[in-house]
Amino acid sequence: MLLISAVAYTAWVLEVVLSTGLDPVQAYISELAAADQPLGGLFRATDLAAGLAVLAAAGTALVGGGTARIGTGLIGNGTAGPRPHHRWALAGWSALALFGAATAADSRLPLSCTPTSDEECAARETAGLVPATHTAHAVTSSLAMVGALAGLVALTVAARRYGWWPPVRRCGPWLLGAELLATAWSLAAIGAFQAGRGTWALGAGQRLQVLLVALWLGVLAWSLFREEGDGERAPDRSTARRTRAGQAGRADEADQADEADQASQADRPGRARREPA
């Protein structure tokens, strides 16, 4: 499901071979799915598929009976409920669920026109004469990116803190840094466009932002696939500490029992001498 979402979330690369009439360097990525675009239905469908797939993956991790197998640590002994020391995993999967739900909603609230390439559309948007879906689309797009960023942060921290998912541990910090830079670029470009100062390559910034999210989903999917193939998950540090402590406690108990047996055996000949024949 994560791989499906990663592939569907990068469907915008089809603009390389399809004639969309939009400049990929300048245009909002959401304009590909605008209601007045001939291929808008295709890109709305891929956004919906991406959102529903990642929502299903996150939901499986949060409530499925096999959550321990994919490293969330939410289900430890057959009973549902988060472990206190796995809160980062719970936060990460919840954030990905938000990302998926917001992306799916985003696809159902398309722009009515393309403001970066249509001056009339931009003027109507500035005057507030566009449908309410423009505002709703901005809200759902923002929520989707907040969910993606929060999921990237939380699951990367979980992987590094609990010793899970080697690909996520290695690539997560780099992807996070690049995603933060791309997000800053996109926000600055949007602000410049809305202030009438040009687009600042807004489209390129947004496409890089979305591409990095798709790469992150792919890395997470690969990590889970490798873990499933290994057949077991490496125990997290806190679990290992508790295991070692339990083994040490059992060893102490065994030593004490041995000492008691030796003392009892040493005292037994004395008792035998004191007994009458």
Image (cartoon, rainbow, N blue to C red):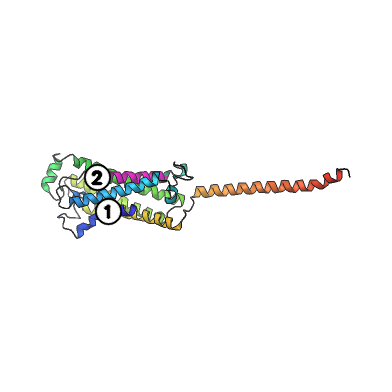
Image disc number at residue 106: 2
Query: In the shown orientation, is residue 244 left or right of residue 110?
Result: right
Q: Nearer the viewer, residue 29 or 271?
A: 271
Q: Element type at marker 2?
A: helix
Amino acid at the residue labelled 1: Ala
Find residue 80 and report its horizontal and vertical position in percent: 44, 42
Give the image quarter of residue 7.
bottom left
Direction left: furthest residue: 120
* Circle 2 residues within 10 Å: few <14, some 14–19, many ≥20: many
| Total number of numbered discs in the rendering | 2
Q: Residue at x 74, y 49 (%)?
A: 262
- Disc 1 designates what residue? 8
Q: CA distance from mark 1 to mark 2?
A: 14 Å
- Of the 4 image quadrants, the one containing the C terminus is top right
Magenta segment, prevailing SS (helix, strand or loop): helix
Direction right: furthest residue: 277
Q: Which residues are magenta?
A: 88-102
